[in-house]
Image (cartoon, rainbow, N blue to C red):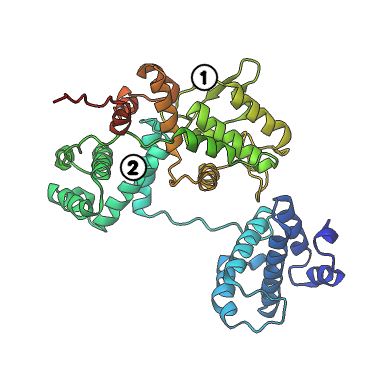
Amino acid sequence: MIESLFRSALVRRRMIVSHLGIIIQDFVLHLHSQGHVLTCIQAYEQAVEHFSRWLESQKVEIASISDSTVDRFLRFHLPRCHCPRPATTNLKTCRAALRSLMIFMRQKSLIQPSPIAKVSHIDQIVNDYDQHLRVSGGLAPNTRLYLRRYAREFLKNRGRKDLRRLTPKDIMGYIQSRAPGLKPASLRVMARALRSFLRFLNLKDYICHHIISAVPTPAPWPRSLPPEILNEDQLRAFLKSFIRTTPTGRRDFAMAQCFYHLGLRTSEVAAIRIEDIDWNNNLLRVATSKQRKERLIPLPNQVSSALLDYVTRGRPVTKAPTLFVRHRAPFGSSVDVHHVRSAMRRAFTRAGIPSSKIHLLRHTFATRLHRRGIDLKSIADFLGHQSLNTTAGYARVNIQELRTASLPWPEEKP
């Protein structure tokens, strides 16, 4: 296998006799198994070989290599490196290669594991808060993410001051310092998040209960315009933009069908597992909604055909539990939310859609259902909305559409 990646016998011999020895060859084969392209493997090998020669010159034993060793190489050796070719001096390449090397060597127990970072007082409070939100509140990961962000920001704003000395004036000072940089909707979210965090602090006896009432409730902003949606021409261009002759194209097209015909969230598409699909009855079990409740969705023929085409002709053999997997390194691992979002944004660009908001597809799906006469309760159940107020946004009158549908005002003859 190594001969197919490096045809030069000189290069292969140079790997073996270097300070890291056979480790470099094993690392190269590991990169290949992860799905890295040949040019990336060769660039990483040159960077690791450069690092190996430097280790030998510094008389650093393999077992004593640590993150600080890599840091010294990157910060002090690379800027004034005069090593002979093919010593790679590109900082970005070397940093990425050595990061992968350290992970590989730790997995093989060749070096000491990463030291456990000391948890600060702020981190401890935020971690306890997140645990409370997850266990007691049952909140979804994305919801906990922004709540943790505001909690951490508030604690850092406090500095080293004792929370037990927190006053209503401190609360107002923090909000007034943040308000100028926030939109009205974001300001309401911040106030809600801060109120939630203060309730937790009161539960843990950090603060008194009356402090919570110091958080103001920003006035509701006037009702916004109906959600932006895609027209029929844009939807057709979007679906036609996928190259369905490649495994990646089949995967992206199947994901697009889940947005177009099912109105799923990005996180729900990324989390679909093969076992969630009932092929016999054409049903999909969605188990990762915001409310952490399962719901069964009927699969239209277009969706089931696209999913089946990807499974049989595009999806690689892998142990990943999810339906959609990566087709680049690390090859065969589950896609993340940002992979799904990036694939749809590339399709938007190809279709000439001037937006990067993937939620447009969900808005469009819900609006199309409403225009067909489906009641809000059914749409809410289909979308997994807990409140009808969320779904009601799709039922608002679109003034622009109303103008095109209105009859001309009759004029009286003189």
Name the amino acid, label 1. Leu
Q: Which of 329 and 389 is in front in this view?
A: 389
Task: Place residue 314 in its image quadrant.
Answer: top right
Image quarter of the C terminus:
top left
Compared across the picture, whether 110 is left or right of 410 comes to right
| Mark in the foreground, 2 or 1 | 1
Query: How many callouts does the rendering have?
Result: 2
Q: Where is residue 244 in the image (x, y as percent from the top left)?
A: 66, 39
Mark closer to the chain start, 2 or 1: 2
Q: Write down the residue under mark 1.
A: 296
Outermost residue to the front: 414
Compared across the picture, whether 50 is left or right of 203 comes to right
Q: Write down the residue under mark 2.
A: 147
Q: Which of 276 and 243 is in front in this view?
A: 243
Question: In the rendered view, would you say 378 is above or below 398?
Answer: above
Compared across the picture, whether 376 is left or right of 72 comes to left
Distance CA(mark 2)–CA(mark 1): 29 Å
Question: In the rendered view, would you say 280 is above or below 140?
Answer: above
Name the amino acid, label 2. Leu
Residues packed near mark 1 inside 10 Å, few (<14), some (14 to 19) or many (20 plus): some
Question: In the rendered view, would you say 383 is above or below 128?
Answer: above
Residues packed near mark 2 inside 10 Å, few (<14), some (14 to 19) or many (20 plus): many
